[in-house]
Amino acid sequence: MRAVPKSLRLTNQARLVEQLLRRGIATRAELAKAGGMSQPTAGKIIDELSSAGVVEELSAVSEVSRGRPSVGRPGKQLRLAQSPARLVVVELGVERTRLSAVPAALPEDERWDVEFRTPGSEATWRQRLRQHAASLSIRRPWGVMVSVPGLVDEKAGKILLCPNLHWCERVDMVATFSDVFRAPVHLIQEIRALALAEVGTRSNTSDFLLVDFGEGVGGSVVVGQRPYEGNVPSTGEIGHTPIAGNTRQCGCGNIGCLETLIAEPWLALSLAETTGQPNATFADVCRLALTAELPRFLTDALDAAAACIAGILNVCGIKRVVLSGHIRDLGPHATDHLIASIRRSAMWSRFDTVEVELVHRRRARGLTIAGIQRVIMPTDWGGR
Ligand SMILES: [Zn+2]
């Protein structure tokens, strides 16, 4: 009998795990069919994945205890393993650094095991990281997935530009994390992690543009259930699109970037400039945005964001936008204004509805999916 080439076996493994990522729970027969392979081939791979601790069978007992009716042969239903922890996921945030130890199963909620305020220097950050990492419940992780708020060369494991956390650019993050956890380390641009989290979470599988508003603004085009990757690692940076008439100096070195109008600290500054109250905060902006008459600085910022978003929709032929982050905190008047402005600017609105959806950020989920794809099943996912 001819041996199955290793690369094909890995591709088949990845296909089956991808089906589980999308479906949550599936029988062996369903996985074989969806993965386009025979039941014996799929069965062998599933047995391997099961002994490696990547997937597990749901017993009839656990299903009944969860109050769900059992269908067909429940003992043969599979899901991603819910224990033990296999990966460390990290959000390196401008304000806070968060860490969790997670199994292959995707976290349902956005929760973190430990977190600390991101300090302004590398030495202190390194010290805090080591201290907090020790309290994670994981022994010998398979890999560490780190989301980074800036331009990242993910293949080279290098941070190229971090406009809101410049000291990161001088740090060999891969070496630092690998020193702490003794495991392979992957950096991922934070907007791509957020986009991955949205894949497979809803029945609508059409392409979309995800835009996240926070300390900065990021955008990711998801095509065929994959965040689009360009030829050069400068993707996701919708926030660094210059807006005519805006003279603010951005942390990226350019002048007039979108994020200097609509990112949290900049909205607070706009309010301070408008009211003459130097201590105005983003929470004050949110309170003000609850009034029916939105302040001019906010509508201008929302219109600028809508124009950037519509430009991408018009070029890429996409009719679905998913928005996350602080845009929800700004309340219904601001979101209605933004949605109307996107629809007004997008060409497809002349023919059909441009769908705009508001979601919660699910960074831990996105990082876990990235970990499954890059560490647990490292093959060329999705055929790209
Ligand atoms: Zn910029």
Image (cartoon, rainbow, N blue to C red):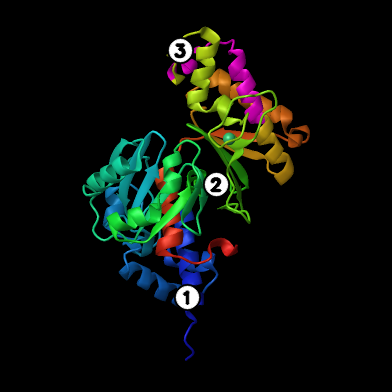
Q: Quadrant of the C terminus?
A: bottom right
Q: Which label is found at residue 37? A: none
Give the secondary structure at mark 2: loop
Give the secondary structure at mark 1: helix
263 to the left or right of 308: left
**Residue at 35 percent of width and 43 percent of height:** 122
The amino acid type found where label 2 is placed reads Ser
**Which residue bears the numbered disc 3?**
278
- Asked whether mark 1 and ligand 1 are closer than 8 Å, the reply comes as no
The amino acid type found where label 3 is placed reads Pro
Residues packed near mark 2 inside 10 Å, few (<14), some (14 to 19) or many (20 plus)? few
Q: How many marks?
A: 3
Residue 192 x, y percent position in the rendering = 52, 47
Give the secondary structure at mark 3: loop
Q: Is residue 113 visible?
A: no
Q: Which label is found at residue 203? A: 2
**What segment is highlighted magenta in the picture?**
283-306
Q: Which label is found at residue 9? A: 1
- Distance from label 3 to label 2 (Cα)? 46 Å
Residues packed near mark 1 inside 10 Å, few (<14), some (14 to 19) or many (20 plus)? some
The amino acid type found where label 1 is placed reads Arg
Residue 264 x, y percent position in the rendering = 49, 26
Kindly indicate the quadrant of the structure image that contains residue 211: top right
Residue 18 x, y percent position in the rendering = 48, 60
- Distance from label 1 to label 3 (Cα)? 61 Å
Judged from the image, the quadrant occupied by ligand 1 is top right
372 and 32: which is toward the camera: 372
Q: Nearer the viewer, mark 2 or mark 1?
A: 1
